[in-house]
Image (cartoon, rainbow, N blue to C red):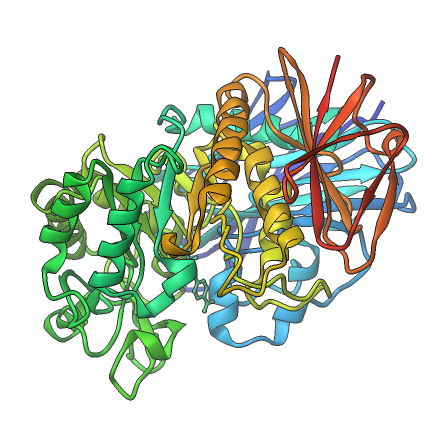
Amino acid sequence: MTNALLKGIELRYLDASGQSRALALDADESSSVRDGLTISAHLEHAIGGTIVRASVVNRGANAIRLTSMIFEIATGFAPSAPARFFKHGYQSWSASGGHDVGASQTHPRDTAHFITRVNHQSETTRPPEFPEAQTSELFTIVDSRDASERVLAGFIGATTSFSTLTVSSPEKIIARAILDDVTLAPGAHRELDPLFIAAADESAARLAARWADATGRWMNARVGAPFQRGWCSWYHYFHAITEDALRANIKSLEAMRSEFPIDVIQLDDGFQSALGDWDTTNEKFPSGLKKIAGEIRAAGFKAGVWTAPFLAARDSRLMSDHPDWFIMRAESGEPVRAGHNPNWTTSDDKFAYALDSSNPAFRAHLRHLFAKLTRDFGYSYLKLDFLYAAAAPGRRHDPNLTRGETLRLGLEAIRAGAGDDSFILGCGCPIGQAVGVVNGMRIGPDVSPFWGSTASGAGDPSTVYALDAIVARSFMHRRLWLNDPDCLMLRARKTRLTADERAALAATIVASGGMLLISDDMSLLDAEAGKLFRTLAEISAKIDSNAMSEPVLALDLMTTGDIRGLITETPAGAIAMILNRGDSSARVQTSDLNLGAGEIAALDLAFDEKIEIFDTIDLPPHSARILRIKR
Ligand code: 9PG
């Protein structure tokens, strides 16, 4: 029996003279006081573990600044035990997976460009005690071969701050609420997000689902939206999308309604007059956004549109009218760069700048903008992208708000403008702060019309990394929101994906039960593709309808091997997916897959073929199979 428990808490802060200080609370105390500053913690046994609620009150005469709250957790594992930990990624596109504890002190991002670090880490520079290589965002799971139980530690809320968990050696986990040196005025108090600790003899994926359950409940996750099927312009047209190309697809989708039953047509990046000016279009969209929404709706679809509401480029109206709405670099007084894209601007300066949602004037702008896009223009599906920008470090309008609070306020302003009946999809979004605001969330990096490198460390968009994320984060679906695994591509031309690769992408998406979005020029698809699409829609809707009661789980959440898989139990038996992401063929023993007992039948989506399975499954490189297991 492991005995995971809280050993102690420590508040790190800056006193009135700017001096770094620490105030500790032992596990057997409920509060600790110094100079009027009080920290307290309350432990509650619930949902099969311990919930720690900590708070801080300033009863002193001077304002102080809060740096972090540190929680030390003993795992019960020996310091020498061979162990692995789950390193959960920061935002939609950031990788998640198992790593050996203590294997590395350095991470490739430690020396990466600022834009890469602001994208993928809750802090662009980690304090030396909490190296990126050993740090997970929001929650972690520690697994030791020497013990039957695994330990989960994670924050089940994210309304007050970003948080990390550092696993430097097997015997302890350091959980940390990142408080960004916010001011705590005399008389003020701050509640921290609850920390959950549990040890259990169940799979890492099931423990992760338990964390997602608890988080979703604590944060009132919006999990009730209907299953989403849609079309997205991005992965065929990219920035080159035009009004005419969109119109041709609206026509095709209307004509092929029974072959391709979809509900939403979503226009992606490429329509806007400038990055930041989301209600006006460029010369490729002469009709304007309102007329286009009207055409999509007249054809019988919901209209969807992409924005990056926390970014703006130099040539935007927004940036020239409101230079004071940006997060500022303390040293230079220049706005903070949070993106770089030559397609986004005609200015010489190709950077995209981060907007400051701690500023109520900018939040009022967001409310008006999204009320206009929804109520006036008629878009009821909003893909909000590059949302991490709101959390960029820098000087903000309101020094009393953490970056996590600022991001959430920005998201809430958008929701307030868009109304509760709009479907909001987060993308490029830090995972915790969006729970309860968004209806759907991209849970991985972009797919692309090529497979990509399977070598670890390469960060370029590629389908294989998207598949890794779909498997790793499947447990979030219908617990935190509807998972968006990113788009299916079925076209056989104008793509570098092979038939096996397209089918592997399709199989992984549908087995996850997540949203089913297609991104093809519909004129490239024939009746056969339509038949496949209907099969996919049927399988994914079935898995989705079951996902509220039974999570879709990775077969082995901690693995780094090329064979990955998903499984979910339904009343009619289990549905699983087995993927060979690697570059060589694999023969897999079904007994090695944690599939449980039962007769197995496989479906090869590439060839629409049912295969009898006995003890082994042969998987070509970059291929997948859907399995049905009779229980
Ligand atoms: C539109 C796209 C699509 C896509 C989003 C997002 O790091 N990068 O440079 C980077 C660029 C684009 C990107 C992700 C990362 O894709 O995920 O679905 O909407 O924006 O520009």
Q: Is residue 446 left or right of residue 459?
A: left
Q: Quadrant of the N terminus?
A: top right
**Picture mark count:** 0
x 59%, y 51%: residue: 502
Q: Quadrant of residue 461?
A: bottom right
Residue 110 visible to the viewer: yes
For the C terminus, the quadrant is top right
Q: Is residue 16 visible?
A: no
Q: Is residue 360 above or below residue 263?
A: below
**Image spot of residue 393 (x, y percent):** 40, 65
Residue 615: percent from left, percent from top:
90, 30
At 16% from the left and 42% from the top, the residue drawn is 417
Q: Is residue 201 above or below residue 85?
A: above
Q: Is residue 217 above or below residue 237?
A: above
In which image quadrant can residue 267 be found? bottom left
Query: Residue most toward the bottom?
Result: 348
| Residue located 48% across and 26% down the image | 541
Q: Position of residue 270 (x, y in %)?
A: 28, 66
Q: Is residue 581 above or below residue 7?
A: below
Residue sitting farthest toward the left? 376
User: Which image quadrant is residue 434 in?
Assistant: top left
In the image, is 235 to the left or to the right of 476? left
116 or 218, nearer to the observer: 116
Q: Residue at x 16, y 52 (%)?
A: 360
Along the line of sight, which residue is nearer the eye, 607 or 446? 607
How far across and down, in percent of the image, does residue 117 sit? 52, 67
Between 184 and 367, the one lying in front of the other is 367
Please tell me in which quarter of the rendered image ligand 1 is found.
bottom left
